[in-house]
Image (cartoon, rainbow, N blue to C red):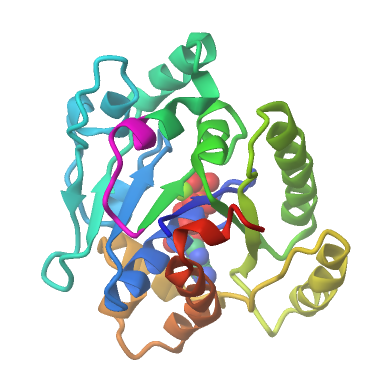
Amino acid sequence: MQIRLAVISNAGGSGKTTLSVHLAYELAKRKYNVALLDLDPQGSLTLFCGLNQPEPEQTLAQVLKDKFDGNWPLTPCWSRHTDKVTVCQGGMILTQTADELVLHKRGAYLLGDCLTDYPLIQDVIIFDCPATLGPLPLMALAAATHMIIPVQLEPKSIQGAAHLLEWYYFHCKHLRLNPSPEILGFVPNQYDAKRSTHRQMLAALPEQLREMNIQSFPPIRESAEFVNASGQGLPLHIYRPNHPAKDDFKEIISSVVALARKPKTSKKNK
Ligand SMILES: Nc1ncnc2c1ncn2[C@@H]1O[C@H](COP(=O)(O)OP(=O)(O)OP(=O)(O)O)[C@@H](O)[C@H]1O
Ligand SMILES: [Mg+2]
């Protein structure tokens, strides 16, 4: 089945874009075609994927216009290393899109409508969302089959994640999403094993999530090389191929691959 994975958290800098690009690259290495959709007015995927600033017509804003003709503006990235990742870029123009969405009759459903009317052929579509839970992440929620939540191991981020879950349950019901996107899990990010608060919060997280039947993936370690790699517009795997942190994504990748291999009908039969 086609996986539409919304990467959502309501905390700035929790690692949404980092997770999005590394999942995209790892999936491409496993022969899956991936489209990265940037729903963020900050347009961070442009930087993290080493792309040029797009014209407004070359962004997701164009897709969400009523006159959209189905010609998705997808730009290949890391093309010296893979031909399987493309990006639909975001940027400031999406602030205007967000305002328009509020008044649009199909508002929250618009991205899902575009994907129904003009399907993308990629195996996996990843929505990189902004940090605030406004109209753009809501649209991602309504279009997604799955959602993944990066969190930092600090009280503010964990508390934010609790609010995010409230938002998720409320809007799945309110928008009558059927099926609701499944929460693939929480991803603790920027984990520093030398910090006792990180160790304690990491140990407590699975227990906190268990009653909601949500899993916590193994953590992504803190490494300055993630920052350096993003500055070069590359995933860590290309920037530092032997860096051990690149293996921190393995379990998440296995989960996504397992889902992508499922026949199309299996989700509906659940
Ligand atoms: N595991 C990590 N170790 C060290 N730095 C990291 C790690 N993950 C992300 N970063 C860095 O932290 C910063 C924020 O990460 P990122 O942009 O992925 O977060 P975000 O949730 O997408 O932020 P925003 O809310 O602004 O969209 C970036 O500079 C990124 O390179
Ligand atoms: Mg981001």
Image quadrant containing the C terminus: bottom right
Q: Main secondary structure of the magenta part?
A: loop
**Measured along the vertical axis of the image, is residue 155 above or below residue 177?**
below
Q: Does residue 184 appear to the left or right of 123 in the view shown? A: right
Residue 237: which quarter of the image?
Answer: bottom left
Which residue sits furthest left? 80
Whether residue 239 is visible here, answered yes or no, is no
| Residue 122, position as x, y percentages in the image | 29, 55
Q: Report if residue 116 lies within the magenta region.
A: yes
Q: Residue at x 51, y 45 (%)?
A: 144
**Measured along the vertical axis of the image, is residue 180 above or below residue 126?**
above
Looking at the picture, tell me which residue is in the foreground, 262 or 90.
Answer: 262
Q: Report if residue 191 lies within the magenta region.
A: no
Q: Does residue 38 appear to the left or right of 87 in the view shown? A: right
**Measured along the vertical axis of the image, is residue 109 above or below residue 260?**
above
Q: Which portion, as a residue range, is magenta? A: 114-123
Q: Does residue 1 appear to the left or right of 179 in the view shown? A: left
| Residue 5, position as x, y percentages in the image | 49, 53
Residue 116: which quarter of the image?
Answer: top left
| Residue 189, position as x, y percentages in the image | 60, 68
Q: Residue at x 75, y 46 (%)?
A: 165
Image quadrant containing the N terminus: bottom left
**Measured along the vertical axis of the image, is residue 47 above or below residue 82?**
above
| Residue 42, position as x, y percentages in the image | 40, 37
Looking at the picture, tell me which residue is in the foreground, 175 or 217.
Answer: 175
Whether residue 167 is visible here, answered yes or no, is yes
